[in-house]
Image (cartoon, helix red, strand yellow):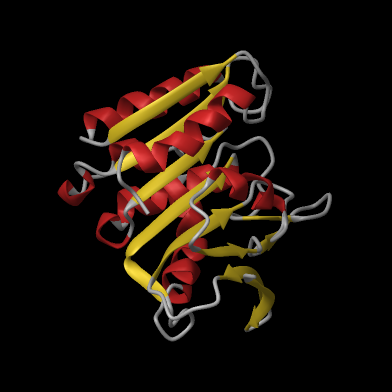
Amino acid sequence: MDNVELLAMDDWVIKTRQPKGTGPYPIFLLLHGWTGDENSMWIFVTGLPSDAIFVAPRGIFPAPGGGYGWHPYQENRWPQAVDFHPAMNKIIDLLTQKNFPCGDFSNINLVGFSQGAALALTLLLTYPAQFQSAVGLSGFLPDGIMQLPQNPLVRGKHVFLAHGTQDEFVSIQRARQTVDHMERAGVNVTYCEDNVGHKLSASCFRGLEAFFSQNNLA
């Protein structure tokens, strides 16, 4: 039986699930969307490799209507890459051998939904040496990141992207721009598009399940 616990680190709530054993185990960082919390991403865990450490932090900024997010709320403005810097700094500080002694820090994978997907992709593009892969579900790239100098270490990384053509929050055009940018950066992109709204379809969930085994990840 795996160990599920809540960690409180300087008032930051983080939910983890760790196998019983010495490892080292691959690490999956689960990043929820706007108004979510540390419980929101566990629905996707069944599609991920099971013998792993799962780390689900709570967003660091309260959302006005409840829940949390990864950047300060600003009405009628699409998030900029710089808006995610405080969250990225906290996540980099979180992922240490001291905090997860059984973790395999050569095998850290990012899984994000919506705003959490934007954070996951921004982390991979900014710190490619520290992450093996990223999953972006119903997500996007924040404004400004496409104009930043590209880290050459991102070439060859594996990314799974899934999006609904009827997404009412993040347009399918933004999703396709994200695919194009990642491919031009040299990333190996697996893309699943389906006729759904702001959620992961059943067929794309099956694609997520296959992604890690097909690419020999985790």
Where is residue 145, by image quadrant?
Answer: top left
Percent position (x, y) of residue 171? Answer: 57, 21
Percent position (x, y) of residue 49? Answer: 48, 51
Q: Is residue 140 visible?
A: no
Image quadrant for the N terminus?
A: bottom right
Apparent side of residue 1 relative to residue 123 in the rendered image (left or right):
right
Q: Nearer the viewer, residue 25 or 97?
A: 25
Q: Residue at x 69, y 41 (%)?
A: 75
Q: Residue at x 82, y 54 (%)?
A: 66
Where is residue 92, by image quadrant?
Answer: bottom left
Apparent side of residue 42 relative to residue 87 in the rendered image (left or right):
right
Residue placed furthest toward the right = 65
Q: Does residue 125 sit above or below 12 in this rendering?
A: above
Q: Residue at x 29, y 37 (%)?
A: 147
Residue placed furthest toward the left = 152
Percent position (x, y) of residue 44? Answer: 62, 45
Percent position (x, y) of residue 207? Answer: 48, 29
Q: Does residue 162 sit above or below 27 in this rendering?
A: above
Q: Nearer the viewer, residue 6 or 51?
A: 51
Q: Does residue 24 sit above or below 186 in this rendering?
A: below
Marker count (numbered): 0
Q: Is residue 166 visible?
A: yes
Image quadrant for the C terminus?
A: bottom left
Q: Residue at x 30, y 62 (%)?
A: 130
